[in-house]
Image (spheres, rainbow, N blue to C red):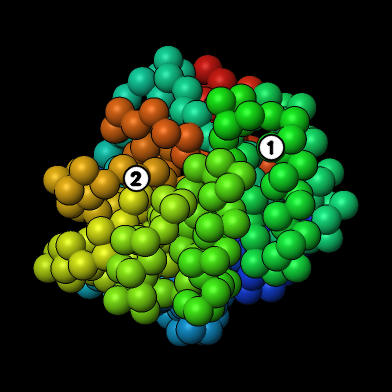
């Protein structure tokens, strides 16, 4: 079997704010694999990183060197390189299924199943966030997720309140993602204020690594907490078990490029379900290649919670795809 890679930079339609700063571009490496006996059939996978968040990205040179090493030796140990592992897993499954972008042969890939998703609102000035909210509501989204923690907290509360004044929790589900922006001292008070607005859940209220403090918050919170960054870098089965048993979160959120690729994500799901911890999957801002694979992985499970898979429209130069978003769901237009 042969493999090669290429790099592509995607550009956001407009700068997208997070608590870690503003994103204007996104880098990805694409692994292609094929058998020498049939070189016309090629499997493709995406290795996608977010600087400052991806545990396997330090700098471009060392990351690309690891991608190159992986293409030279497909048996390279990638346990500490989840984004490259996800790219290679996807490429191999695509090749196995004929090289047409079918990673899992299920009802999503046949065009028979759509997946409910949330509409993502990026951080920014209140007027900009309000504009995004109106757009998502007009497109038929029933679940809205707002990234918070970058502007004044009371301004964010007012934005959320403006939605609640118009729509009850039965009409619009509100999620928020703090990306670890709250200090442990202020977190419980802020969670209490948010809970008064019938928020569904908050992702990662405090920064990762404060396990005992997160355990305390999950025990006391009036607002369900979803672990996200907390799971990054936890790769061994016994470590995953210890983390879930210690913190006892209300939800976990999984990104294959951050949480162990396809294999690691499946293990997290199995461990969570054993403990009756609900979960959902989100992209790590992959292009349509990676997003398609994540959607297909998600469709392997029966999960009615809205997923975080509505990121395909972020870029001006995304790779063409049959993925379509309509009325708060994502599907393949005519199957693959």
Q: Nearer the viewer, residue 65 or 1?
A: 65
Residue 282 percent across, percent down from the top left: 47, 48
Q: Residue at x 47, y 23 (%)?
A: 114
Who's the residue at 76% across and 52% down the image? Answer: 158
Q: Position of residue 139 (x, y in %)?
A: 72, 27
Of the pair 23 and 65, the residue shown nearer to us: 23
Q: Earlier in the sequence, mark 1 or mark 2?
A: 1
How packed mark 2 is, by other alpha carbons closer than 10 Å (few <14, some 14-19, many 20 or more), is: many
Where is 224 relative to 209, above or below?
above
Q: Is residue 231 above or below residue 56?
A: above
Nearer-the-camera pick, 143 or 295? 143
* Residue neighbourhood size for the residue with mark 1, other residues' Cα within 10 Å, grouped as few (<14), some (14–19), many (≥20): some
Residue 279 — which label? 2
Instruction: Indicate which label's residue lies in the foreground, 1 or 2.
Output: 1
User: Mark 1 highlights which residue?
Assistant: 164
Is residue 334 something that shows in the picture?
yes
């Amino acid at each position: 079997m042969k493999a090669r890679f290429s790099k592509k930079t995607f550009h956001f339609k407009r700068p997208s704010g997070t608590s870690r700063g503003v994103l204007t571009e996104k880098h990805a490496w694409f692994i292609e694999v094929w058998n020498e006996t049939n070189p016309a059939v090629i499997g493709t996978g995406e290795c996608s990183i977010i600087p400052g968040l991806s545990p396997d990205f330090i700098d471009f040179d060392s990351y690309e060197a690891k991608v190159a090493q992986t293409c030279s030796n497909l048996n390279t140990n990638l346990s500490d390189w989840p984004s490259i592992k996800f790219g290679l897993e996807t490429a191999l499954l695509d090749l196995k299924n004929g090289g047409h972008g079918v990673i899992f042969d299920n009802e999503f890939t046949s065009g028979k199943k759509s997946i409910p998703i949330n509409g993502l609102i990026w951080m920014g000035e209140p007027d900009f966030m309000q504009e995004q909210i109106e757009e998502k509501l007009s497109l038929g989204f029933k679940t809205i997720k707002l990234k918070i923690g970058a502007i004044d907290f009371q301004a964010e509360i007012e934005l959320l309140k403006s939605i609640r004044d118009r729509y009850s929790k039965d009409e619009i589900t509100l999620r928020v993602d703090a990306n670890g922006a709250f200090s442990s001292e202020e977190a419980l008070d802020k969670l209490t204020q948010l809970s008064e607005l019938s928020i569904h859940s908050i992702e990662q209220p405090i920064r990762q690594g404060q396990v005992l403090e997160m355990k305390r918050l999950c025990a006391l919170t009036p607002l369900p907490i979803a672990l996200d960054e907390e799971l990054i870098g936890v790769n061994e089965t016994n470590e995953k078990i210890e983390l879930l048993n210690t913190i006892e979160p209300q939800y976990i959120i999984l990104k294959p490029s951050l949480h162990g690729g396809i294999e690691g994500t499946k293990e997290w799901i199995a461990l969570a379900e054993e403990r009756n911890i609900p979960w959902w999957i989100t992209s790590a801002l992959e292009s349509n290649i990676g997003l398609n694979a994540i959607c297909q992985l998600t469709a392997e499970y029966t999960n009615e919670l809205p997923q975080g898979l509505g990121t395909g429209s972020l870029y001006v130069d995304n790779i063409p795809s049959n993925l379509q978003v309509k009325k708060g769901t994502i599907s393949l237009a005519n199957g693959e």
